Image: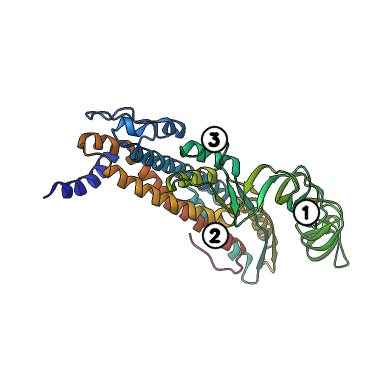
């Protein structure tokens, strides 16, 4: 067997064998016993990874050291992103399942969401085959920080100077605080007057339709006080569901501005002055930088993405049991918004980030194999990076699974019929 062939066989074995003892410990690997060198940063702390010199510690070329560092950074950020998404779904789907009568406790978002789908099916069966469900959604607008992306790029790529990274936004809109005139959509941080179309609640006369409870008159019929009822027509009074039209009072939700107007909340669109804390709801286009650093920064900023809340109104008609229908409506309207952040607001970006990080990590693994001819030093390097690389590949698959199950929860919440659905 040639030396080259031996290396091709031995490196995968080293990755598998040396990874095993360290998988259980996500903290530091200060020294690899019995191996020369072996210094390793705390893989739970991205700041330590950023400061660590892989080239000098493992006798690598500067190019190989930089590539491996960026790959490890991307891996750790991918794991943090996956954990954040899973935690959000665990809370939302777990709450949905619990509010509908499921007393079990779940460990992951995937488990909780599958349980929520099942219990929603059980509850819909109690509503009867004649029940129809209509879910009206004003979708979330999720943005990632432009400034945070520029800062990450400068820290990762030596060719980019801090404070000078030019980051553009493509295929989406800018989002942030607009101290002057906003042209687009304004998410009201507190109920305020809306000069355009209000999606949310309205505390005064609605010029348009109200898909929710109307306290006043619905299509000319009195629906006041305790008699306030679901209205899918013109509401003259207060609407606690989704307004589709102008609101003469205060709009609690998002306002699609008919022209340039002041916005007391988050502006998504154009601002007549420089937007404060700018975010991008589309694809961030960074300055020229390595694919490894881009994957790392994509994962980092996506983990801290912020979303304007989706506004939902669920209408159920023809239910055999009104109390069961009311319970279903309350549980969905309370817990579904966070699920929609993943299913609608971030799904496209999450899939792209997971794919790019997977490619970068696999490339970094190949760089590790080719980085050194010293078998013992090579073994120490493998032991150092095996755990975050393994975790990142699992996280990439986990993020896609989270997106898929969140879409299934949304579909189940809006599906009519009495058939039970499993997870």
Query: Disc 2 or 1, which lies upstream in sequence?
Result: 1
Q: In the rendered view, would you say 231 is above or below 91?
A: below
> Is 29 rendered above or below residue 283?
above
Contact? badges 3 and 1 (CB < 8 Å): no
Q: Specify few, some or many for label 2: CA neighbours under 10 Å numbering under 14, 14-19, or 20 or more.
A: some
Q: How many marks?
A: 3
Towards the viewer: 334 or 25: 25
Q: CA distance from mark 2 to mark 1?
A: 25 Å
Residue 255 visible, this angle: yes
Residue 19: x and y in percent read 29, 40
Residue 407, numbered circle: 2
Q: Secondary structure at mark 1?
A: strand
**Which class describes the residues within 10 Å of circle 3: few (<14), some (14-19), or many (20+)?**
some
Residue wearing tag 3: 162
Judged left or right of residue 20, residue 114 is right
Residue 21 sits in quarter:
top left
Mark found first going from the N terminus, 3 or 1: 3
What separation in Å lies between label 2 and label 3 (alpha carbons)?
39 Å
Choose between 228 and 242: the one closer to the eye. Answer: 242
Estimate how packed mark 1 is, as few (under 14), some (14 to 19) or many (20 or more) residues with alpha carbons within 10 Å.
Answer: many
Kindly report which numbered mark, 3 or 1, lies closer to the viewer in this rendering: 3
Camera-nearest residue between 420 and 87: 87
Q: Secondary structure at mark 2?
A: helix
Mark yes or no: residue 107 visible: no
Q: Position of residue 180 (x, y in %)?
A: 78, 44
Q: Find residue 201 and name its label.
A: 1
Residue that protrudes farthest toward the left in the picture: 1
Q: Position of residue 265 (x, y in %)?
A: 74, 45
């Amino acid at each position: 067997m040639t030396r080259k062939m031996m290396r091709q066989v031995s490196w995968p074995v080293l990755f598998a064998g040396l990874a095993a003892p360290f998988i259980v410990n996500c903290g530091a690997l200060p020294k690899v016993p019995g191996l020369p060198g072996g210094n390793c940063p705390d893989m739970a702390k991205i700041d330590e990874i950023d400061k660590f010199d892989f080239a000098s510690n493992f006798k690598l070329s500067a190019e190989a050291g930089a590539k491996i560092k960026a790959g490890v950074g991307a891996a750790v950020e991918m794991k943090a992103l996956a954990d954040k998404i899973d935690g959000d779904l665990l809370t939302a789907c777990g709450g949905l399942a619990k509010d509908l009568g499921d007393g079990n406790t779940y460990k992951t978002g995937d488990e909780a969401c599958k349980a929520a789908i099942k219990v929603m099916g059980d509850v819909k069966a109690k509503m009867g085959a004649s029940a129809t469900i209509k879910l009206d959604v004003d979708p979330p607008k999720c943005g990632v920080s432009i400034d945070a992306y520029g800062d990450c790029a400068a820290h990762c790529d030596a060719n980019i100077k801090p404070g000078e990274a030019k980051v553009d936004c493509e295929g989406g809109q800018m989002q942030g605080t607009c101290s002057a005139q906003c042209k687009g959509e304004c998410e009201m941080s507190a109920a305020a007057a809306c000069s355009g179309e209000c999606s949310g609640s309205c505390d005064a006369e609605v010029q348009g339709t109200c898909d929710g409870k109307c306290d006043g008159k619905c299509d000319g019929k009195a629906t006041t006080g305790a008699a306030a009822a679901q209205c899918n027509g013109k509401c003259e009074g207060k609407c606690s569901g989704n307004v589709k039209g102008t609101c003469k009072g205060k709009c609690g939700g998002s306002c699609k501005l008919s022209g340039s107007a002041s916005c007391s909340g988050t502006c998504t669109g154009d601002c007549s002055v420089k937007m404060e804390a700018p975010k991008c709801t589309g694809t961030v286009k960074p300055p020229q930088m390595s694919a490894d650093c881009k994957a790392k920064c994509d994962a980092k900023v996506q983990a801290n993405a912020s979303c304007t809340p989706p506004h939902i109104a669920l209408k159920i008609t023809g239910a055999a049991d009104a109390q069961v229908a009311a319970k279903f409506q309350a549980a969905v309207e309370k817990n579904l918004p966070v699920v929609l952040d993943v299913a609608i607001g971030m799904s496209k970006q999450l899939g792209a980030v997971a794919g790019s990080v997977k490619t970068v990590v696999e490339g970094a693994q190949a760089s590790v194999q080719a980085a050194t001819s010293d078998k013992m030093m090579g073994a120490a390097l493998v032991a150092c990076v095996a755990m975050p690389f393994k975790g990142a590949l699992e996280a990439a698959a986990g993020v896609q699974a989270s997106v898929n199950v969140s879409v299934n929860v949304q579909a189940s919440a809006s599906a009519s019929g009495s058939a039970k659905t499993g997870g």
